[in-house]
Amino acid sequence: MKYIFLPGMDGTGELYKPFTKQLSGIDFEVINLNHFSESTYSFLTTALVEKLNNENMVLIAESFSGPLALNIASRLGSKVKAVCICASFVSSPVGKIFSFAPWKMLFSFRPPKFLVKHYLIGDCDSKSLNSFYLAIQAASASNLAARLRAVFSLRPDQLPELSIPVLYLEGTEDRLIGPQSVKKFKKKYPHSVIKKIQGPHLLMQTQPDKCLKEIEDFCKNKIAQIKV
């Protein structure tokens, strides 16, 4: 069984390092979305289905990649044993008015520290903040803007129905993904298990130990039930 990590908006997967360094005896792969020529959900789904179709796996995805993981799980069928989603959504978590902003231009600038802390990472040390900036700088402004366009156009009816186990990790201090987005996720996937963890939007970076425990417990219990 392999853990496949799908990254957030930065696309690099570098922000998973606080989490993956805890993994012991677990085979895993972190996908870098910046290696692909397009950023739409449909393109990335097709590309990753082709890449991953020879393995049994658990998909772990945060933020932008939540819908991507759900699409891949539907396409790969029994090869995906569970999906673990962190701080994600089934439709845009912000209002349509934000889609008209000049995002490519805005992403050309380094985001202010106070906004990053307020909306994404909370009160953190300088090392965590620097890791965030390095990950964002590794993605082009055009890729970041394209991913945001994909999020703005997302609708729940575009996502597949799933019968496999689905875990959703919700940060109780997430100022980007509000409770309404979590409710929409639960409505779309009523069998999903919602677990609240105290922390900001970048939950797997700031609370890696708690996230790992929830994921391991969930996979152990749910995948065992499937085998019985």
Image (cartoon, grey):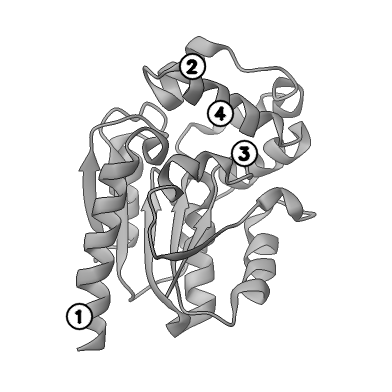
Question: What is the C-alpha distance between the residues marked 4 and 3?
Answer: 11 Å
Pointer 4 residue: 131
Task: Answer whether labels 2 and 1 touch (C-beta < 8 Å).
Answer: no
Who comes first in sequence, dot 4 or dot 1?
4
Q: Is residue 88 visible?
A: no
| Label annotation for residue 225 | 1
Observer-side mark, 2 or 1, equals 2
Question: What is the C-alpha distance between the residues marked 4 and 2?
Answer: 9 Å
Residue type at mark 2 is Ser
- Would you identify the image quadrant in which residue 209 lies? top left
Q: Secondary structure at mark 2?
A: helix
Question: What is the C-alpha distance between the residues marked 4 and 1?
Answer: 38 Å
Q: Residues within 10 Å of mark 2 (few under 14, many from 20)?
A: few
Q: Does 86 sit left or right of 67 as displayed?
A: left
Q: Residue at x 34, y 60 (%)?
A: 188
Q: Secondary structure at mark 3?
A: loop
Residue 29: x and y in percent read 55, 61
Question: What is the C-alpha distance between the residues marked 3 and 2?
Answer: 19 Å
Who comes first in sequence, dot 4 or dot 3?
3
Observer-side mark, 4 or 3, equals 4
Q: Quadrant of the N terminus?
A: bottom left
Q: Secondary structure at mark 4?
A: helix
Q: Residue at x 70, y 21 (%)?
A: 106
Residue type at mark 4 is Ser
Pointer 2 residue: 126
Q: Would you place residue 141 above or below residue 58 in this image?
A: above
Pointer 3 residue: 10
